[in-house]
Image: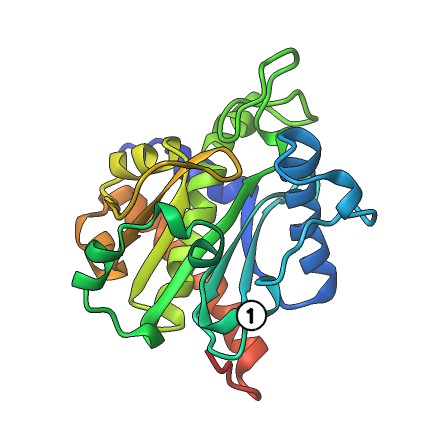
């Protein structure tokens, strides 16, 4: 019987791993990616605010963070965080409620009739520039490749880093039972996710916040109901890695979200 040819996702699994951040060292890697992307590359935040070259904010303490690690170099290729509603932090607000309030369609959101205890936001999704650009290529947030020491086959998989980071955030919503998910997204990401079968509903207008973004909403169940089979396989791979890390971290001290 002829062996099934390896897919791009198969190759991605070979070259990358996904980690739940459980140590201070891992957290610094995530903050470092964010600094390089948000501060140095796109100037969304002033570099002098972060002399340690690690971008962080007031919501990180209450968040769960994930890293995408390039196995060959052990380098952080991307990161994402899940921010749950926490009444003891920032008056129970999510980042988009604090910083992007004017863009929210409050009437539309109120009609969703959401239990606040089930709400979270996926944010600070970033892909390191080394995994996005070819030499001389114009900087973009999610695509393209820089010349790093790896094979052409590896380079082809770099386009999946942003998707894997988002799937990591999605896995955390299931693990932590957060069934109502918001995100402030650039136009690129909803389009990318729609091609995989994951369709967010828009719940507000565009605004300039770390680039032009708009607020979106989805339930994890609706996302899983429509996800393409190959992306579902990738999601399951991501989920298993994060679940193992989550159980190890919280088996003795349950997380209070």
**Res. 238 in view:** no
Q: Residue furthest top?
A: 136
Mark 1 — residue?
Answer: 62
* Depth order, front residue of 192/249: 192
Label 1 Cα neighbours within 10 Å, binned few <14 / some 14-19 / many ≥20: some
Tell whether 108 sits left or right of 34.
left
**Res. 205 in view:** yes
Q: Residue furthest right?
A: 51
* Depth order, front residue of 111/54: 111
- At x 33%, y 34%, the residue is 192
Give the vertical position of 200 relative to 189 (above or below). Answer: below
Res 182 → quadrant: bottom left
User: Which of the colour schemes (rainbow, by chain, secondary structure, one colour) is used?
Assistant: rainbow
- At x 48%, y 58%, the residue is 98
How many numbered dots are placed on residues in this image? 1
Give residue 257's position: percent from left, percent from top: 46, 78
Tell whether 146 sits left or right of 168.
right
Give residue 16's position: percent from left, percent from top: 55, 44
Give the vertical position of 215 relative to 243 (above or below). Answer: above
Res 253 → quadrant: bottom right
Tell whether 174 sits left or right of 91.
left
Give residue 136's position: percent from left, percent from top: 65, 11
Secondary structure of the residue carrying tag 1 is helix
Give residue 151's position: percent from left, percent from top: 60, 24
* Depth order, front residue of 18/91: 91
């Amino acid at each position: 019987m002829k062996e099934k040819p390896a897919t791009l996702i198969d190759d991605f699994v070979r070259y990358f791993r996904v980690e739940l951040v459980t140590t201070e060292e891992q957290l610094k890697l995530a903050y470092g990616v964010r600094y390089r992307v948000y501060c140095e590359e796109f100037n969304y935040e002033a570099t002098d605010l972060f002399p340690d070259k690690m971008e962080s904010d007031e919501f990180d303490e209450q968040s769960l963070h994930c890293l995408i690690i390039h196995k060959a170099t052990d380098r952080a290729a991307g990161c994402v965080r899940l921010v749950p509603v926490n009444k003891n932090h920032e008056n129970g607000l999510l980042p988009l409620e604090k910083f992007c309030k004017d863009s929210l369609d409050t009437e539309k959101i109120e009609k969703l009739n959401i239990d606040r205890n089930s709400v979270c936001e996926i944010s600070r999704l970033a892909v390191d520039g080394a995994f996005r650009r070819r030499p001389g290529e114009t900087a973009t947030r999610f695509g393209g490749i820089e010349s790093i020491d790896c094979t052409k086959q590896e380079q082809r998989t770099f386009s999946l880093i942003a998707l894997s980071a988002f799937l990591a955030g999605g896995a955390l919503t299931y693990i932590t039972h957060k069934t109502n998910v918001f995100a402030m997204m650039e136009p690129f990401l909803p389009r990318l996710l729609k091609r995989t079968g994951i369709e967010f509903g828009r719940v507000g207008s565009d605004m300039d916040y770390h680039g032009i973004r708009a607020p979106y909403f989805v339930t994890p169940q609706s996302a899983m109901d429509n996800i393409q089979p190959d992306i579902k396989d990738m999601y399951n791979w991501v989920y298993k890695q994060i679940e193992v890390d989550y159980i190890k971290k919280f088996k003795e001290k349950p997380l209070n979200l």
